[in-house]
C-alpha cells in the first residue's frame, strides 16, 4: 500500500511539471531531424500546460546555423516575451518568457507558444538546438539534432553521375 501511495505521489508531481518541448516544422521528430540544404525550418516551442515559465532556446556553441525571426503566439499569454540571447561557451538564441497579467487576456494556453526560424546550417554538419528552463539551466528539457542534407535534385544528379561512371568502366 505504501509503495502504491508513493508511486501515485511521484506520478502526480511529474504530471504537474511544466512540459515544454521543441517541434521542427510542425512535427515532433524525437532527437534528430534532417533539413534540406538552403531551406529555412520553423522551430516551435510547445507547452503541454498553462503554467508560466522562463527559458532559453539556443543553437549550442559549435553548431552551425542560426535562430532568427522569433514570434510570440497568443498561447504565450498577454505578456509573453522573447529577446536575443548570446553567451560565450553556451550558444546563441532567445530568452523566452510565458506569463500573463491579472487580466489574463489572452490567457496562457496549451500548444505552440513561440516560433523561431532556423537557417544557415552547413551541408553535412549537425547543430544541436536545446531548450533550457528555469530554475535549473544545467540540463536541457528538450533538444533536437538538426543535420543539413543535400536537396533531392543534387542527390539524384550525383546518383546518375555514379551510374554513368560505372557504365564507362
Image: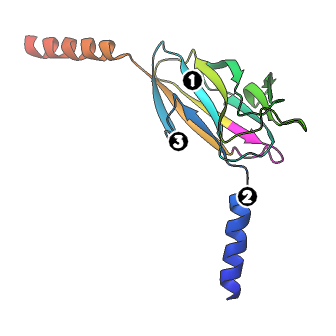
Earlier along the polypeptide chain: callout 3 or callout 2?
2
**What's the residue at 54%, 34% (across, down)?**
145
Q: Which is closer to the viewer, label 1 or label 2? A: 2
Q: On the image, numbered disc 1 is attached to which residue?
A: 42
Is residue 125 located in the magenta-colored stretch of the structure? no
Q: Looking at the image, do the residues carrying marks 3 and 2 touch, with CB atoms under 8 Å apart?
A: no
- From the image, tell me which residue sits under label 2: 16
Front position among marks 3 and 2: 2
Using a 10 Å C-alpha cutoff, classify the residue at mark 3 as few (fewer than 14 neighbours), some (14 to 19) or many (20 or more). Answer: few
Q: Is residue 12 visible?
A: yes
Left or right of 104 in this view: 15: left
Q: Quadrant of residue 129?
A: top right
| Boundaries of the magenta span | 131-140
Per the model, the C-alpha gap separating discs 1 and 3 is: 16 Å
- Could you tell me if residue 169 is visible in this image? no
Q: Spatial distance from mark 1 to mark 2, Cα to Cα?
A: 28 Å
Q: Nearer the viewer, residue 93 or 7?
A: 7
Q: Residue 31 shows which numbered tag?
A: 3
Residues under numbered marks 1 and 2 in contact, where contact means CB atoms less than 8 Å apart: no
**Quadrant location of residue 103?**
top right
Q: Residue at x 21, y 11 (%)?
A: 161
Apparent side of residue 3 relative to residue 37 in the rendered image (left or right): right
Q: Dot 1, how many residues are within 10 Å of its Cα: few (below 14), some (14-19), or many (20+)?
A: some
Closer-to-camera residue (46/165): 46
Is there CB contact under 8 Å for labels 1 and 3?
no
x, y (%) of residue 79? 84, 29
Amino acid at each position: 500500500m505504501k509503495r502504491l501511495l508513493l508511486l501515485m505521489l511521484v506520478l502526480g508531481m511529474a504530471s504537474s511539471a511544466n512540459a515544454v518541448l521543441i517541434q521542427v516544422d510542425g512535427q515532433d521528430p524525437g532527437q534528430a531531424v534532417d533539413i534540406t540544404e538552403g531551406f529555412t525550418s520553423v522551430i516551435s516551442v510547445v507547452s503541454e500546460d498553462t503554467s508560466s515559465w522562463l527559458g532559453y532556446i539556443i543553437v549550442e556553441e559549435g553548431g552551425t546555423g542560426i535562430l532568427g525571426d522569433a514570434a510570440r503566439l497568443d498561447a504565450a499569454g498577454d505578456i509573453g516575451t522573447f529577446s536575443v540571447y548570446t553567451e560565450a561557451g553556451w550558444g546563441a538564441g532567445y530568452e523566452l518568457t510565458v506569463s500573463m497579467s491579472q487580466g489574463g487576456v489572452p490567457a496562457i494556453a496549451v500548444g505552440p507558444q513561440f516560433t523561431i526560424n532556423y537557417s544557415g546550417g552547413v551541408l553535412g554538419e549537425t547543430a544541436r538546438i536545446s531548450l533550457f528552463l528555469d530554475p535549473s539551466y544545467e540540463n536541457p528539457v528538450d533538444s533536437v539534432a538538426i543535420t543539413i542534407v543535400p536537396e533531392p535534385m543534387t542527390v539524384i544528379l550525383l546518383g546518375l553521375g555514379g551510374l554513368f561512371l560505372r557504365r564507362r568502366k
